[in-house]
Every structure is written in C-alpha cells, then in structure tokens.
C-alpha cells in the first residue's frame, strides 16, 4: 500500500511533470520529473532495463524532505519517468530517504538499500538528524518497506563512530549470492571513511571492516561511496567534503577514486593511487553499475552543492545527471568515455581537417547546443593560447582555453549567463607530453562535458545560457592546426 505521502508526491509529479515543455529540458541528460534532483541512486540493470533513481523533492526546485524519483531506460540516454519510488513516510525515515542503491533478490524482486534519516533530540536538547540504513522491496515500480526498523544503525558501528554521519550504502551481490555494501562513516581518528558490511540475504547486515579513510588528507567526511573491480584493479570511489586545495584538488566537495588491490578473503584494500575524477565545476555523487555486457558504467550528479543558489529563473526543474560514462584503467588511472550508446544518436557529420587557426574563426556547419564535437589541436611553435568558444552569441559564451607552454586547460563559464558569483572557472594541467590535444565535447542545452585526450581527464559544467546562444568559434594567439569533427545528436 502506498502511503498518503507517496501518493501525494505521485499525484503532484503526474500533474506537473508533463507541464514542463520538452524543449526546456536537456535532451539526453536526466532531469527530475519536476522539482529538485540531487544524487543518482539505485543505478542498476533490472529486468531488461536500466533503472535510475534520484534524490528528489518534487514540490520545489530546492532540496527538501528526500523522496526517491525513478526513471528507466534501455540505452542510458532516453529516459522514461516512473512514479516516485520512495517517500519519507516511515517513523524511521520521516526526515528523508537519503541516497542508496539497488540489487536483485533471489526471488527476482528488487531490493533498495538506503539511508533513513530521523531527527532525534540529543542530550543537550538539540534536534539532530540520525542516519541509519533501511530497506525497501519492490517489483521495479512499487516498493514497500518490509521492516518496522532500520537494518543497520549506530549499534552496528565500531565504538565511537558517528551516528550523524553514516550514509549512502552501495550494495552489490557477491559471486556466492551473498551481499556486500560499502557505506560512509566518520571515525574520530579516521575522519570520513568507507566501511564494508556484509549480509547473507540483503536484510540482515553486519560490519566487516574499514576499507580506507581520509585521515585528514581527503576532506572531513566522505559521501556516496562505491567499490568495484575494474580491469584487474580495485576502485574505491567517494566524494570527500570540504577538501583543502592542493595539487589538482580544488576546495570543497569533489569525487576521488582510490585505486589499488583487494584481498576479498581478508577484506583488505591497499591503496596505490588517488585520482580526482573530474576537474570541472559540476560533478558529484557518482554511482556505477555493471552492464550485462560487463562494462562498468558511471553516472553522477552534474551539479556542485556550492552552486545550487544559481538556477535559471522560472524553471520547474533543477539538477541533472551526467551522460553516463564507461570506465577503464590505463596506466593505473581511470579513463572515462561517454557510453557507446551515444554513437547511435549520431546524425549529420561535419568534418574539417587541419585548418590553420589564428584569429577568431567559425567553421562551416560547426555549432549548436546539442552535439558531440571532437577537436584535435596541434599548436605551432610559439602559440600562446588556443581558445574554443561554446554556446556563444554577442552576450554569452563558455570558453575552453589551452596554454601549450604550461599545458593548462581552463574552462570558463563566467559569461554563460549566470546570476550569482559562484565558481565559474576551473583549470587543469593536461597530463602527458603529447603536443597534440584532443577534446571531445558533449553539449546538451544546459551542459558541457569535456573528455581530454581520450578521457584521461574530464571537465564538466552546467551552463544555463539562453538556447539562442549556439555559436562555436575557435581562436589562437599564435597559430594552431585544428581538426574538427561534429555530429549533431538526434533522439
Ligand atoms: C550527497 C548527499 C548524500 C546524502 C544526500 C542527501 O550529495 O549529501 O550524502 O545521502 O546527498 O540528499
């Protein structure tokens, strides 16, 4: 039986979701049916299709008591909305159904494992949100909460671990049919940490070990963990909060991958390498799945918490997910490429080979706000900068500027049409020594995703620029040779 709180959300979204004109949404990036979206949740392949749930507040374009929105897709790009899956309607989750994940039960039902949030009065009289983990079970459409209490709470944690920072379970099934989950917690000495839990049936859980922890190095707390094997390595992914800027890491929230090895018998993860997952502005709360063909595919919230004050005026939705990315390991680092399903959307192709660029130039047929554009740039000796302007008209643009001498690539959306003084500029140092730079740029009305040198690095940002600003131009301070290949995308 659906609770009145869930029924109300379902009625609201069914009425107001269809009122949003298709032209006011991105084409192949998932947005909430109506209202607010943050983290992707429960990303999985279940009964023949991909499911993607999301942190959801249908009633306004601001964060509120968390529901789970729900959508399904056969190709990770065309999404169909389903009714909201979870609402904060149980005594143990009345203040929010926070992030979590999905797995299949032996009887074919779908299991959702999520963080249940409930405000409780503390000994000093303060009301604080206590975080526990709970389950819901369903058929891919309707879910019920089978227990009267959470399946994991602070009593299951080691001595001294916080009950206010214990969240975002990511579940997976082991080859023997049992289940494991990685959940973030906060220890006195460890700070943010990824904890491993196990369960024979998905319902009864026990603590196993600490997989890894920040220990002051990677933020104060972690969020949205994931733990999976990739090309012979083991990856622990998490979102550190409040990092200090150093090396490639910027201040605030980000996503890191800790890459190493794992001994599943002794549950020992040994970290070998740490990598920042995206060097742009809007990228957080990653979650991966393994596709039926074995690919490891990642989604994420294409938004920064620090930037949520800036929304397009009057829009009835806020928050998007990235274009899902395939992950691989090369030379000990994660490589990201857009899912190959995107190739099926390739329409008209425009190709310009080895065009000398000096002043600002546009190229016949290159432009638009929904496109898959690959640029190969070879700066000539003495070239100081090469610049691509995207989503440009007389009053707007988002630029990518490359400085060959320092290998710095800068994404700048400060003239993209935002109203607030939030982060608009980020730079990264392009890895390697190649003189040629390759940039694959995905445009989808309200976003730019840049895959550098085959996905060795990425930079992602939202742009709420008027759609009429659809110019793309190139310029060099000095000389560069440019090869440009653009596909229009049709869905
Ligand atoms: C990450 C996060 C999660 C939490 C959810 C709440 O963006 O803070 O840790 O479960 O959002 O909406």
Image (tube, grey):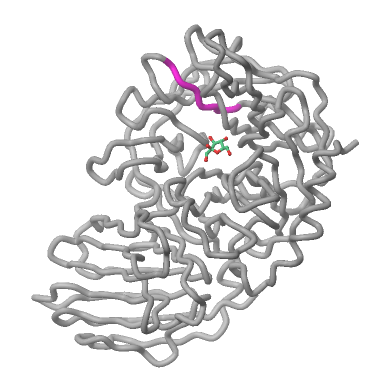
Q: Residue 372 in magenta?
A: no
Q: How many marks?
A: 0
Query: Which residue occupies 37% across, 54% down?
Result: 422
* Image position, residue 406 (x, y; %): 15, 60
What's the magenta region?
181-187
Q: Quarter of the image holding residue 138? A: top right
- Ligand 1 image-quadrant field: top right
Is 381 on the left-hand or right-hand side of 282?
A: left
Q: Residue 182 in magenta?
A: yes
Q: Quarter of the image holding residue 270? A: top left
Q: Is residue 129 above or below residue 432?
A: above
Q: Is residue 50 above or below residue 224?
A: below
Quarter containing the C terminus: bottom right
Query: Which residue occupies 34% across, 32% down?
Result: 218
Q: Quarter of the image holding residue 413? A: bottom left
Is 18 on the left-hand or right-hand side of 438?
A: right
* Image position, residue 468 (x, y; %): 50, 82
Residue 456 showing in the rendered view = no
- Comparing 42 with 67, the one in front is 67
Quarter containing the N terminus: top right
Query: Which residue occupies 65% across, 18% down?
Result: 152
Q: Is residue 304 above or below residue 187?
A: below
Is 261 on the left-hand or right-hand side of 207?
A: left
* Image position, residue 370 (x, y; %): 53, 75
Q: Main secondary structure of the magenta part?
A: strand
* Image position, residue 420 (x, y; %): 40, 58
Residue 54 showing in the rendered view = yes
- Comparing 82 with 351, the one in front is 82
- Comparing 307 with 270, the one in front is 307
Query: Which residue occupies 26% across, 41% down?
Result: 245
């Amino acid at each position: 039986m659906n609770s009145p709180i869930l029924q109300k959300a379902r009625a609201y979204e069914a009425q107001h979701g269809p009122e949003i004109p298709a032209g006011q949404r991105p084409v192949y990036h998932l947005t909430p049916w109506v209202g607010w979206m943050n983290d992707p949740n429960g990303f999985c392949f279940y009964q023949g299709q991909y499911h993607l749930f999301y942190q959801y507040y249908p009633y306004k374009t601001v964060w509120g008591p968390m529901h789970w929105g729900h959508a399904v897709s056969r190709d990770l790009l065309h999404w169909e909305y389903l009714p909201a899956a979870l609402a904060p309607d149980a005594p143990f989750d009345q203040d929010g159904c926070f992030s979590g994940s999905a797995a299949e039960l032996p009887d074919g039902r779908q299991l959702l494992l999520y963080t249940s949030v409930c405000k409780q009065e503390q000994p000093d009289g303060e009301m604080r949100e206590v975080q526990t983990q709970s389950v819901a079970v369903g058929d891919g459409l309707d879910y019920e909460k089978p227990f009267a209490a959470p399946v994991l709470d602070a009593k299951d944690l080691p001595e001294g671990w916080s009950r206010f920072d214990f969240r975002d379970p990511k579940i997976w099934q082991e080859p023997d049919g049992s289940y494991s989950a990685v959940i973030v917690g906060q220890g006195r000495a460890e700070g943010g940490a990824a904890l491993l839990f196990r369960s024979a049936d998905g319902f009864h859980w026990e603590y196993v070990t600490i997989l890894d922890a920040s220990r002051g190095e990677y933020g104060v707390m972690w969020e949205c963990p994931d733990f999976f094997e990739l090309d012979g390595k083991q990856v622990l992914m998490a979102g550190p909060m409040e990092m200090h800027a150093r090396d490639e890491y910027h201040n605030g929230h980000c996503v890191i991958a800790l890459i190493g090895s794992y001994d599943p018998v002794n549950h020992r993860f040994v970290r070998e390498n740490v990598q920042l997952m995206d060097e742009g502005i809007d990228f957080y709360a990653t979650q991966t799945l393994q596709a039926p063909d074995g690919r490891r595919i990642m989604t994420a919230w294409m938004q920064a918490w620090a930037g949520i004050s800036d929304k397009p005026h009057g829009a009835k939705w806020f928050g998007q997910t990235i274009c899902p990315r395939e992950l691989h390991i090369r030379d000990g680092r994660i490589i990201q490429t857009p899912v190959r399903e995107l190739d099926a959307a390739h329409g008209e192709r425009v190709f310009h080979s080895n065009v000398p660029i000096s002043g600002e130039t546009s190229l016949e047929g290159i432009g638009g706000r929904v496109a898959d554009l690959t640029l190969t740039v070879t700066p000539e000796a003495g070239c100081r900068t090469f610049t691509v302007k995207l989503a440009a008209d007389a009053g707007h643009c988002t630029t990518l500027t490359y400085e060959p001498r320092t290998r710095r690539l800068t994404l700048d959306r400060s003239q993209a049409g935002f109203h607030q003084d939030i982060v608009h500029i980020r730079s990264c140092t392009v890895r390697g020594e190649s003189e040629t730079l390759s940039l694959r740029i995905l445009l989808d009305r309200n976003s730019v995703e840049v895959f550098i040198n085959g996905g060795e690095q990425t930079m992602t940002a939202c742009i709420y620029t008027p759609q009429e600003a659809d110019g793309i131009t190139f310029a060099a301070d000095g000389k560069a040779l440019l090869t440009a290949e653009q596909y229009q995308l049709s869905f």
